[in-house]
Amino acid sequence: MADMERLIDLQNISKEYDNTLVLEDINLYIRENEFVTLLGPSGCGKTTTLRIIGGFEHPTEGVVLFEGKDITHLPPYKRKVNTIFQKYALFPHLNVQDNIAFGQRIAKVPSAEIKKRVEKMLDLVDLRGYGKRRVDQLSGGQQQRVAIARALINEPQVLLLDEPLGALDLKLRKDMQLELKRMQRMLGITFLYVTHDQEEALTMSDTVVVMNRGRILQIGTPKDVYDEPVNSFVADFIGESNIYPGIMLEDQLVRFAGCDFPCVDKGFGHNQPVDIVIRPEDIQIVDMDAGQITGTVESVLFKGVHYEMIINAGELEFKIHSTVMQEPGTRVGLSIIPFNIHIMNPIPAENEEDMPDEIIEGDEVS
Amino acid sequence: MSRIIKRTYLAFILFFLYVPIVVLIFYSFNAGKSRAKWEGFSLHWYADLFQDAAILKALYVTLSVAVIAAIAATVLGTLAAIGIHAMRKRPQGFMMTMTTLPLTMPDIVTGISLMILFTFARIERGYFTMLLAHITFNTPFVILSVMPKLKQMNKHTYEAALDLGATPSYALVHVILPEIVPGIITGCLLAFTLSLDDFVISYFTTSPMVQNLSTLIYSKARIGIEPTLNALSALMFLSLLILLLMINRRAARAEKR
């Protein structure tokens, strides 16, 4: 049972706050040196999951294994994980080097050694010469780096990161994404990362865990969850999507938008209601008579790399990304190749309403 | 025009507020005994003050009660604030209401209820009961000055300390206390000042044998006001004024940050 590859193993974790279920039967394992991202909208339980691993919350049910040992009720200061908190939570009364040295002082490392390690960390996070600064004199990005150094100096086996880049501007966020990834590879530390930013998740992770309403919807590589989302929620959350209800007539044939489309999916049975997901970049704009369906261009938005066009085709609207612009009002044909039509089982209705909207994120409850 | 009216109005308020005190201080330097006739400048009432054994004893009682009560209330209040802060929303709201309630209660109610409590518990009134009473009414003030500092803290700071290996007590001493120390000092000064200032509660919780300055002045005034009391009141006013200015400056500085 103790699979050595599994560094952290969450088994049947449930968590309740005041009779509200915020996590329901979470099963997840994290391998050594893996970069795992918990992705989902706010209130989906991702932060609570992270805090259970950090030891700040205890699950109502289930066990947390670390290297095969049960650590469910171990306090945070006895765990070999370190956390980067939202807004960093640096100690304002200590300067940069004392912040970084905090964990080492507790571990009673000799002070000469601490000094050496702090210097090394300052190098690693590119803050050489900042050791004596007060932390409130640093910019957000620099504070972020101090928080990273403060955690990494303790050589944790796992680093937990709770939306660490949320407070940074876009440019800085992109730089930090690359830098975090570089550190993770270089130091060979397992990262468990929490974010609601799907692009961040796809860029950095080895494994993406998509969560919603306290449940795990899909676990897979970034490519898996993007190309083969298990349901329309995942499809919609990861990247933009056109989602339509349809009927699976038979294997490899689906009907929606008043039209029958060949597709590649099989095994849904005959005349079954399904969800159809099509990425905006997967719809081709062709001449009117060459398309499977026809429509009118309603609006065009310039998005930098591509144009985003809304095409009105009777009762349905299609969102299309293309580098070629069509004038609004133009009648066009749309064509979709079978491979790009993704068929999914519809989300059962009970999933939508079984939890209140204001599910408490872990950090709201202190 | 309206500005002149505003200014005049304000001047009147300040005049009526401070004129009695100014008169009192003014006549404390009067050479004669009269409070109506100026008979020349003298400091001899101040000199008399420091030769009056009863007054010196009362001064000692006042200061020692204030110091001990302030320290005890600071320790209790700080710990209470940390505890209340860690509670969940609803019990926290309840505890804060329980904390602010005594502040809105008239001193006389607090004084009488404490007196009844001591009588009921068969504790003889005196120095000790007065001290207990002062600790009791000071503690909420400390809680109220420490609480904002705790609320200002990043809520994850304490968790960050635990995360880095600190035990809860290490985190308390090395992370939480340094953060809230300004609030603790303000609370302590406030408690000290209120304790020096208090008359009503002290009056009901001490015996005639143990008197602090305010109860002493009161009992002496019933016989007839001696000019030494002018000098004493002037000194008390000044020292309280200085303390209050210190507290206000601290509060103003804390707000600026």
Image (spheres, coloured by chain):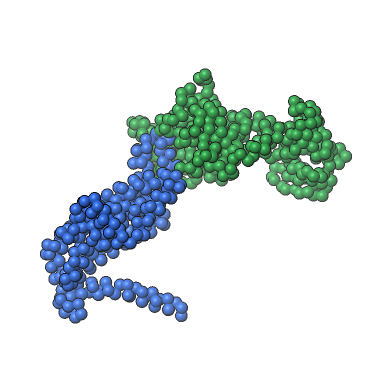
> Can you name the residue that lies furthest to the right here?
A289
x%, y% of residue A103? 39, 34
A156, above or below B68, in the image: above
Q: Is residue B51 visible?
A: yes
Given residues A199 and B37, the one toward you in this image is: B37
x%, y% of residue A16? 51, 37
> As drawn, is B134 to the left or to the right of A33?
left
- Indicate the chain coloured green by its letter: A
B58, above or below A113, in the image: below
Chain B's shade in the image?
A: blue
Given residues B244 and A64, the one toward you in this image is: A64
B77, above or below B207, in the image: above
Residue at image position (54%, 25%) is A31
x%, y% of residue A214? 57, 36
> As drawn, is A3 to the left or to the right of B236?
right
Given residues A215 and B207, the one toward you in this image is: B207
